[in-house]
Amino acid sequence: MSAQHGAGDVPHSPHLRPLADSDPGSVGPYTLTGRLAQDGAGVVYGATDSQGSPIAVRVADERLAADPGGRSALERRIAALQGVAGVCALPVLAADTRAERPWVATGAPSGPSLRSQVEARGPLPREALLALAAGTAEALTGAEPAGLAYGAITPDDVVLAPDGPRLAGLDALGGTGGSAFAAADIPMGRAEWASPETAEGAPLSASGDVFSWGCLVAYAATGRHPFMPAGAADEEADPHLRVREGSPDLDGVPGELAPLIGLALVADPGSRPTAESAYRGLVAYASADDTSQTPTRELADRLRAIIAAGWKADASAVSPDASATGGSGADGAPANGTVPAADAPGPGRPGALATAVVTVSSMAAAMVIGAGGFLTAASFAGEPQAAPSESPSPESPFGSAEQAVSEAAAALKSGESYRAVEDVEGGGTPTAERREHVLTSLEGEPFFQTATLLGDPEAPAAGSTAYVYRPQSELLLRRDFGGGVEGRYVVAALPDESAGDRLGSRTPAVKPFEELMETMRVAERIEGRLNGTPALHVGGRFAPAADGERHSGVRFDLWTDADGHPLRLDYTAGGTEHNWNYSGFGGLESGICGVVDGVPDVERAYLVPTRGDLACDEVRPVVEEYLAIPEADQQAAGYVAEVGEWTCRMSPPPDGDPATRAYTSDVGACERGPAERVDLVLLDETP
């Protein structure tokens, strides 16, 4: 088995070293079989589980475990590690932070390191290189939300397992090999792979990991460090001096990857792409269909397909670590994790390449880089490009990412109508909620409807509420319903001076866009379609306020149409998922369906659909036909009548006494079965 490490300058070894006399025979449920590595933070042991499967167990150093501050940092770090998941990251199998010496166990994939593979057989072939780049970018993407960073990724940290690359080192307990929870110096031998700011003592960061990733992919493509050319004089071989001078050597990196790697290797951390944008772009490049609307967490199967296409081993290849690893992988693949050498003919290579590598222009459309920018077709064709563009092409109907957010906010702030529906689930919300914010305009006057539907929106639970607010008269109506109870519209006083702004649905609908404009860091700008509509997809991270606190680094995905109207916004803050959908900017067919006259006792009332997705031009004729029935006939029938499939009634029945309506604004309703209802509501004055 191939030893791994993530901290210190511990060499990787294909062989276990014997346990020391002071070493335990087991840790937790795992039987120790030898030592793999050691650093200032502890020891990495080879172990087996109850099934005999190989495991790597990191045990904290006694001094680190005895220090209260160090133990607290370990506990937080291990908790963060347990939240990291991905195809190419090593999974945390178990951990014990309360043990005398805290420990964490991870998977231990077999296979050679990237360094041993490249030194023995040369640079990776094109399709395997794409799989390695996408897989390691995915591992970085999974670490960032947990507040973790690798710090310095070397070719020794990548294990070429039979089923794809595995990135080791995130489980390092001392902070090097990365952490937002504990700091450490980058040891000699690793510093050359670290970003310049990390090597100079800056805190470990996700952008630093992207730089290190760029060095790693360049090495896999060329067999050399991009800032340490072979045969250079000592002063020329200083990698960080060459970074500051902006001169990476990318000769030999495939043309479709070179622009991305070049951007990852810039000196300014803020100008590098995020790991997530690199990962999404590589997956999109290798996919024949559109992945722009697929959430990042749902791209795992696409990545597995890329790896399956690029990781197909040459039957004649022999890994330098074969004697150490042995066995066989899935489908009879060699368990040494071999990948074809760059110059090996390799049967089946053209088919794999056709699957994994499409065209330069498609990658240009798929790959999106960094803060607000994306790469153009010219950059992938090898033409000079000074920096990623933040603007669309001249033929594009869409503006920049920043324009898209600004225009979406403006549509909600000034539009005469819209429907904004927010589905909320998880986190501090005990049950799923749907929050509807509807603006309609009648004869130039705005009416706001706000509803909170608990549980199933089609059959809301008890405690659901709906408001109708008419700013001109400062009239607020409330209806409590759900759990089989329909509820009545009743007059409610505005609780405070700002309540009108809150219940006037612009404020809650606009708030996420204001937070985006203030805090967003754009990672993607992709032109495509959403549910058949031409759309611009903008993705990245921002800092929304939720549950009384600000959450930083929250992933968002926004889609807007060519007119600048928002279509959809998704994000998760504090464990709560927020999924917004928008419509109705050109006028709503339902909402407040206008006024009807001839209503007994009140003369006129507003039509308010309260159940079902009802169009105004469908319900208005029904209500008007009901009101056209002579009042004597209505009175004789108790003000109940059948109109086609609808049952209409006045409630409470008119009696000419104003006191009858002292506590309700309900006038009547028409229903078609249990799922569709339109109410007649008094909105002109307080009853």
Image: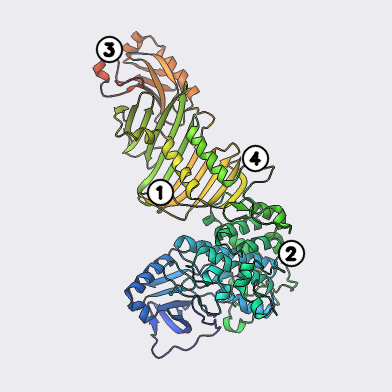
Quadrant in which the N terminus is drawn: bottom right
Question: Residue 65's quadrant in the figure?
Answer: bottom left
Return the residue found at the far left. Answer: 659
Mark nearer the N terminus (2 vs 3): 2
* Vertical comparison of 357 with 550: above or below: below
Separation of residues labelled 4 and 2 (CA atoms): 37 Å
* Percent of width and height locating residue 669: 37, 23
Q: Is residue 379 visible?
A: yes
Mark nearer the N terminus (4 vs 3): 4
Mark nearer the N terminus (1 vs 4): 4
Q: Image point 54% across, 63% down: which residue?
A: 207
Query: Residue flagged by tag 1: what amino acid is it?
Result: Ala
* Left or right side of 271 for 224: right
Q: Say which residue label 2 marks.
A: 350
Q: Are marks 1 and 2 in contact (CB under 8 Å)?
A: no
Q: Say which residue label 4 marks.
A: 397
The disc at residue 656 is 3
* Left or right side of 249 for 109: left
Q: Nearer the viewer, residue 193 or 121?
A: 193
Question: Residue 480's quadrant in the figure?
Answer: top left
Q: Nearer the viewer, residue 319 or 592?
A: 592
Question: Residue 66's quadrant in the figure?
Answer: bottom left
Separation of residues labelled 2 and 3 (CA atoms): 86 Å
Separation of residues labelled 1 and 3 (CA atoms): 51 Å
Q: Say which residue label 1 marks.
A: 545
